[in-house]
Image (tube, rainbow, N blue to C red):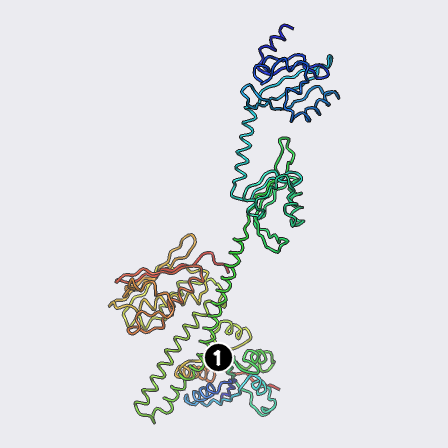
Amino acid sequence: MNSLSTVFELSDDYLFVANAEGKLTNLSSSIYRKLNLSKADLLNKHFLDLMNPDDAVSIHNNIQTLQDGVDHFNVVSSAKNKEGRTIFIEWNINRDTDSKDILGIGRDVSTKLNEVRSEREKLESLITHTPAAVAMLDNDIRYIIHSKRWLTDYGLGDIDIIGKSHYEVFPDIPQRWKDDHQNCLKGNILVNPQDHWQRDDGTDVYIAYEIRPWYNSNGTVGGIIFYTQVITDYIETQKELEAKVTELRRSNLDLEQFAYVASHDLQEPLRMIGNFSELLKIQYGPQLDSRALEYIDISIGSAKKMKELISNLLNYSRVGRLESDLKMADIESMVQSQISEHQLMIQDTAATVDYSELPDNLLCVPSQLEMVFHNLINNALKFNKSSKPKVHVSYEETKTDHVFRVEDNGIGISKDNINKIFLAFRRLHKTEYPGTGIGLALCKKIIERHKGHINVASSENGSIFTFTISKSLTE
Amino acid sequence: MLNILHIEDNEGDIILTEQAFKLIDTKTKIEFVKNGAEGMDYLKKRGDYKSSSTPDLILLDINMPLMDGKEVLINIKNDQELRKIPVIMLTTSASEKDIEFCYDNGANAYIPKAIDFSEFMVSIEKIEGFWLKYNLFPTVNPN
């Protein structure tokens, strides 16, 4: 007895003994020392008076279970200390099986609780201020917590939805989503990078989401968490962009179609003008004077020039049309045949055209790539005032591309003009050199169709054209 | 003597072919019909062409009204007798698809129409020279 009263005197925990009816018979001095209570007030009072009246109902229910044979229970209840601050006491209430006396041991858990509370507040704040629409729901798909963005992104305004059913907040949730939620409650994670939600008011909403179950400490699913992002604006922008790209592609195709039809249809009458001017000269030449013959020659010459222009234009428009197939080609023999084609020009100007090792097996549209070599070699020889024009073709490969280089010692391209040379019908030397102004534009278009790029470096000592053919092309 | 049938709708081209053959001073006899349907009548000796003579060589345009050159080519090459006659496509089309189609269907040559007459003369001269001087023709009995 003595030692018990010493314990009651010295304990920092809160101890009490109550009789079978719950009336307090003994209290530790800590209760009087630390709590805002006095001894006289408490003896013979019910031990519930030690606790916050707000908790009385749940404690009372627990007391019932004590009477039904359970020997103890735990409960946390608040109280005021001497300084008037609220503290939290975790009570361990035991019933002595023999005497039926009730023994209570209380410990101040304020610090521990405050820590938990502060952790919880941090988490709540993190969720609330997450710049995404996030919500945590329970097993009945009722809101436990959500981010502010949840309200704004789904146009809910400033209403309080905590405790409300998700289906009450959004009456137009489709059944398939409800099924998803049930599925998720079984422990499955659902991820959808783009889903369409036709709302009852007719608006289209696009959402990217992930739905995960969350777990109680005992390992059971406590509910689900929505991580969602409203991507309607993004999807709409993307759709607009796609529509513009389609429109652009169509108008490009129209233009190519127009160029094709126009040049094709122009060719016929032109062929007649050219042929008949010549036939006229052959059959009636002897009866005509020199001036008439000169006029006929001008007609023939003009027809030829126009023919060249049209045929270049036709080539240019054909590159965009899907008429050509990718095939394996021997580039060395392709370049060799272009050199042969320029033999007359090479002899006339005492030029040398050579090449270092070139691939013999390269996937491309051969007829188109040949046009590129034709134009580049032709330009290198044509725009050249050197007494010994030189053209050199070389090749190297990178991880992703085949890289070709055509170098010359020609007149070069001035800085002002270097950006203009790949535009169609841009002729830099109209009077001095003949041409149609399509060659390099054609090269650029062909190279782009081969997923490559073409550029030029130039000085007064000559030009280096570099172009690539992608290795990612497939037959 | 070489007998040529030129199936061609363009009046200008008819004159050009006629003149070219005349200028190279050949003994070739050349006949013209103005579209594919007439061409088939000529070859099958039907209608106005009951007394036509079977040509040794056919020059065939592609783009024509009524029946185009591709259809004429298919008809000729599916005919047990006519298929023996060499067919030379003479056309403005340089389309890879057209070239492939014609060879697939039994064309014997494919020659683009030239823009200038002297070049055209050269090709006619070569056609005539090769087929008349070096080639041996089969006997064809259309009926």
At mark 1, the secondary structure is strand
Residue placed most toward the observer, A21 or A241: A21
In the rendered view of the protein, which quadrant contains the N terminus of chain A?
A: top right
Compared to residue A347, the image places residue A59 above or below, namely above
Q: Is residue B64 above or below residue A312?
A: below
Which residue lies at the image location 41% right of the left edge and 57% below the top edge? A402
Q: Nearer the viewer, residue A127 or A355?
A: A127
Residue B2 picture location, percent across and down = 49, 87
Q: Is residue A346 left or right of residue A84?
A: left
> In the displayed structure, does residue A424 sit left or right of residue A156?
left
Q: Residue A154 or A357: which is nearer the viewer?
A: A154
Q: Is residue A137 above or below residue A434?
A: above
Q: Nearer the viewer, residue B29 or A291?
A: A291
Chain designation of label 1: B
Q: Which residue is mark 1?
A: B91
Query: Where does residue A314 sit, x and y in percent of width and height?
Result: 44, 73
